[in-house]
Image (cartoon, grey):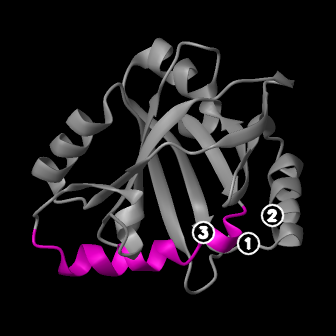
């Protein structure tokens, strides 16, 4: 699938501790700065059943790739705990197109993955950002494929990407609110 100009690819790793993992990533690769927050999620469906997906995440950049670290906040069944329990910290999912998808484009992308034979593992709505769907590709890529509507939240992605290019390594962990001048 060709990606439209102006979109980013995101790679996600599930971790036990955001702060420790972000520090290791920054030291080893120069990724960052990391913007940390706990999304407010609603309407979660996990493996065809109502689910609970409480987690924190950190977003940063490594070159032109958006990096995501996800830390589950409980032991409830979820796609994040699935990976932690099966193999520990590591690769979790890829989001091939992080761009401001419209509702119709989001639905079309989900149908495309289903037509390829991938099964929906989890879906939710991230309040203020949009819908997210995660398709099970464990047998083919060792993780999940995410489709994220992102809508109103998309403007933060290029701001993070640009910030990475001029970042001097100081203050590697930041609250998401600081991205647009908040404290």
Instruction: Name the residue that disc number 1 marks.
Output: 101
Dominant secondary structure, magenta: helix
Report the front residue among 115 and 61: 61
Residue drawn at (61%, 37%) of the image? 140
Calculate the distance from the C-alpha at mark 1 to the C-alpha at mark 2.
6 Å
Q: Tag 1: Cα neighbours inside 10 Å, few (<14), some, or many (≥20)?
A: many
Q: Is residue 150 magenta?
A: yes
Task: From the viewer's perspective, tell me whether residue 24 is left or right of residue 153.
Answer: left
Task: From the viewer's perspective, tell me whether residue 54 is left or right of residue 167.
Answer: right
Magenta span of residues: 149-168
Calculate the distance from the C-alpha at mark 3 to the C-alpha at mark 2.
14 Å
Report the front residue among 113 and 97: 97
Instruction: Name the residue that disc number 3 marks.
Output: 153
Residue drawn at (10%, 49%) of the image? 27
Q: Quadrant of residue 174?
A: bottom left
Q: Are marks 1 and 2 in contact (CB under 8 Å)?
A: yes
Instruction: Name the residue that disc number 2 marks.
Output: 106
């Amino acid at each position: 699938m060709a990606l439209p100009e102006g979109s980013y690819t995101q790679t996600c790793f599930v971790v036990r501790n955001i702060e420790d993992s972000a520090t290791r990533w920054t030291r080893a690769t120069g990724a960052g700065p990391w913007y940390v927050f706990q999304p407010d999620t609603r309407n979660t469906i996990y493996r065809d059943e109502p689910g609970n997906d409480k987690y924190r995440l950190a977003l940063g950049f490594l070159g032109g790739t958006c990096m995501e670290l996800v830390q589950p906040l409980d032991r409830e069944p979820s796609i994040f705990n699935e990976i932690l329990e099966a193999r520990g910290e590591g690769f979790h999912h890829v989001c091939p197109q992080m761009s401001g998808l419209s509702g119709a484009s989001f639905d079309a992308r989900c149908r495309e993955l289903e037509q390829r034979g991938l099964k929906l593992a989890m879906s939710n709505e991230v309040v203020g950002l949009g819908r997210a769907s995660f398709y099970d590709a464990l047998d083919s890529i060792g993780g999940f494929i995410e489709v994220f509507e992102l809508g109103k939240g998309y403007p933060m992605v290029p701001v993070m990407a640009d910030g990475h290019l001029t970042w001097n390594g100081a203050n590697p962990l930041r609250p998401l609110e600081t991205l647009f001048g908040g404290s």
